[in-house]
Amino acid sequence: MMYVRFPLSLRNVEDPLHERGIDISYKTVRLWWNRFGPLFAADIREKRVSQMRVYSNWQWHLDEAFVNISGETHYLWRAVDHEGEVLESFVTKRRDRKAALKFPRKTMKRHGRVHVFVTDKLRSYGAAMKEIGNADRQETGRW
């Protein structure tokens, strides 16, 4: 648990446990972290997201970036919450209304409805937001 709460290395976790009479190796700590770390992280993320939904400032920043995969240009769509944590990412070959619609729907299915979308001025977002019903809650701006 100390490794999750504090930014300690595996060997730094071994020392305080040894002081308390628990004689384990840093390799054991690594095995525990690999096994239980994702469970702790999922629980922490779920609690944080549920607390953030209560506040009216719950907003997502939607953005797309060009990426090359095997020499072909693709688009990496991502949703970032107002605290800077990446909620979802999605890769497509096209940057059209269909992709701009699929991405927020996929994200909302996992994380719930959002109060405000902050986007760049890509016209595909406007068409997608009209279909979703969030056209009045869309802001444009740089982030």
Image (cartoon, rainbow, N blue to C red):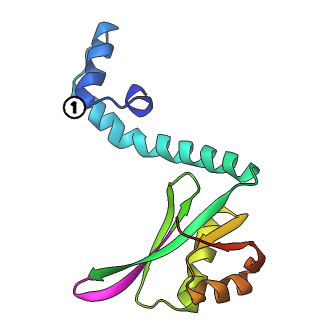
Of 117 and 121, which appears nearest the observer? 121
Is residue 89 shown left or right of residue 47?
A: left
Question: Total of numbered circles in the picture?
Answer: 1
Residue drawn at x 26%, y 14% as measured from the top left? 23
Q: Specify start and end residues of the magenta stretch as a single range.
A: 69-78
**Residue wearing tag 1:** 27
Looking at the magenta stretch, what is its main secondary structure? strand
Q: Is residue 55 above or below residue 33?
A: below
Residue drawn at x 57%, y 66% as measured from the top left? 61
Based on the picture, tell me whether residue 73 belongs to the magenta stretch.
yes
Helix, strand or loop status at disc 1 = helix
* Residue 116 sits in quarter: bottom right
Residue drawn at x 55%, y 71% as measured from the top left? 62
Of 24 and 8, which appears nearest the observer? 8
* Residue 6 sits in quarter: top left
Image location of residue 110, percent across then percent down: 61, 64
Q: Is residue 86 above or below residue 50?
A: below
Residue 121 visible? The answer is yes
* Residue 97 sits in quarter: bottom right
Residue 113 visible? The answer is no
- For the N terminus, which image quadrant? top left
Based on the picture, tell me whether residue 14 belongs to the magenta stretch.
no
Image location of residue 106, percent across then percent down: 59, 74
Is residue 135 shown left or right of residue 65?
A: right
Image location of residue 117, percent across then percent down: 65, 69
Image location of residue 101, percent across then percent down: 61, 84
Q: Amino acid at mark 1?
A: Lys
Q: Is residue 34 above or below residue 92?
A: above
Is residue 73 shown left or right of residue 134?
A: left
